[in-house]
Image (cartoon, rainbow, N blue to C red):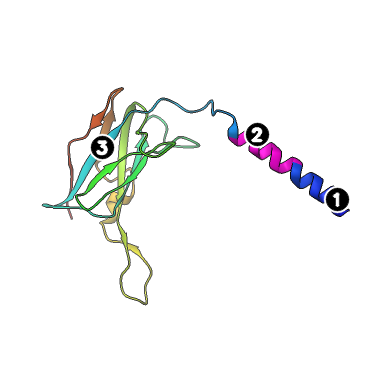
Amino acid sequence: MLTRRCWLLGVGAFAIGLSSCAPSETRVPTFPVSGTIMDGKKPLVNATVVFHPVSGLGGDVVRPRGRTDEQGQFTLTTYDGNDGAPVGEYTITVEQYLAGRPDEGPRNRLPAKYAKHETSGLRATIQAAPNELTPFELKK
């Protein structure tokens, strides 16, 4: 019984290994994307930025994302570290989760409208070339 379980686990691990090594046929080309997010006149630090494709807002569509640094700058990742985003039109969400008081967990410190692609008002178009986006300025 134990030998059969071990054999089945080995076969399962082998199959998973094969599927993870196979090239993904659903990947689309990506292009470098960088930008800056400002909170009024100062950089927005440690915020998560997600690009939502306008042409495919449901299902298994890829959503490139990034995180702002101390200068409010970000680069996007779709599949692998800082690979950019596919060509297209995007709406953008931004959230900044920071810890508050010890008795409360992290919460989004930005207005709720920026957490939804329908209400953020932030948009970008990604071209088939390196993309340096115009800085986004959030208004509270």
The residues colored magenta run 11-20
**Which callout, 3 or 1, points at the residue further toward the start of the chain?**
1
Residue carrying label 2: 18
Which residue does the image show at 24% across and 54% down from the upper left? 45
**Label 3 element class:** strand
Where is residue 96 drawn, in percent x and y?
A: 30, 56
**Vertical arrangement, residue 53 with respect to residue 128, above or below:** below
**Which callout, 2 or 3, points at the residue further toward the start of the chain?**
2
| Type of the residue with mark 3 | Ser
Please give left or right for residue 48 compared with residue 43 in the image: right
Please give left or right for residue 24 compared with residue 73 in the image: right
**Label 1 element class:** helix
Where is residue 8 drawn, in percent x and y?
A: 79, 45
Marks 3 & 1, CB-CB < 8 Å contact: no
Where is residue 98 drawn, in percent x and y?
A: 31, 63
Residue carrying label 1: 3
Marks 2 & 3, CB-CB < 8 Å contact: no
Residue carrying label 3: 34
Residue occupying the far top of the picture: 128
Give the overall secondary structure of the magenta segment.
Answer: helix
Disc marking residue 61: none
**Vertical arrangement, residue 4 with respect to residue 90, above or below:** below
Marks 2 & 1, CB-CB < 8 Å contact: no
Please name which of the two marks, 3 or 1, marks the residue nearer to the observer: 1
